[in-house]
Amino acid sequence: MSDSTPASTTGPDKGRFVIAFALAILSLVVGWDAWRLSGINTYSAVGPEAFPAVISAGLALLALANAVEAVREGAQDRPRDEIGPMAWVLGGLIGQIVLLAFGAGFAIATGWLFAATAKGFGRGPLWGHFLAGALMCFVIYAVFAKGLQLALPAGPLERLI
């Protein structure tokens, strides 16, 4: 997935600082949502704010760790990114969204995402990974929708069960 021509710089790693800043912002957003959810009356000691609060704390720790590593490690040589593999993964995500919007269902849409991601990582053939991904997602659909009674988008394959 990378080219062999790294870019060399000195000083703190600016890329890690950007990631640390993004993680800190995300931590604040999730933490604000957890605080907002804390006002909801619940019947148990663990309310709807528990997991967002834990996730917010984890994101804050990751932000802090990235900032410390940016200073401690300094800038590092990174290989250039290849556009092709990233385009396959992005195409898989966009394809999944479009397929779900047009009623293809969970198994077909997520099977496409699986196949496109595998293609992005250099695996093939596309149709084989699509079939494997669709089959796995069909089983996941059956477990979640039928076993746990959770609503997942149903398409032609899911309507068979």
Image: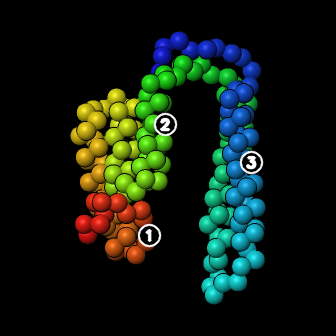
Q: Is residue 160 above or below residue 112?
A: below
| Front position in the image: 36 or 77 | 36
Residue for point 62% across, 22% down? 76
Q: Residue at x 38, y 68 (%)?
A: 144
**Residue 105 tag number:** none
Q: Amino acid at mark 2?
A: Leu
Q: For the view shown, which residue lies furthest in the top direction?
A: 5
Residue that badge 1 annotates:
151
Mark 3 or mark 2: which comes first in sequence? 3
- What residue is disc 3 on? 25
As drawn, which residue projects farthest toward the front? 102
Q: Position of residue 120 (x, y in %)?
A: 39, 32
Q: Is residue 10 left or right of residue 159?
A: right
Q: Residues within 10 Å of mark 2 (few under 14, many from 20)?
A: some
Q: Quadrant of residue 112?
A: top left
Give the vertical position of 22 relative to 81 (above or below).
below
Tell me the element at label 3: helix
Q: How is the image coloured?
A: rainbow
Q: Position of residue 2 (x, y in %)?
A: 47, 21
Residue that numbered label 2 is attached to: 90
Q: Which comes before the other along the chain, label 1 or label 3?
A: 3
Q: Could you tell me which secondary element the residue under label 2 belongs to?
A: helix
- Mark 3 and mark 1 in contact (Cβ < 8 Å)? no
| Up-down relation of residue 126 to residue 107 (above or below) | above
Assess whether mark 2 and mark 3 are in contact (beta carbons under 8 angstroms): no
Which residue is depicted at the point 70% across and 83% down? Answer: 41
**Which image quadrant for residue 38?**
bottom right
Residue plotted at (72% across, 63% down): 33
Q: Are marks 1 and 2 in contact (CB under 8 Å)?
A: no
Position in image of residue 98 (x %, y %): 46, 47
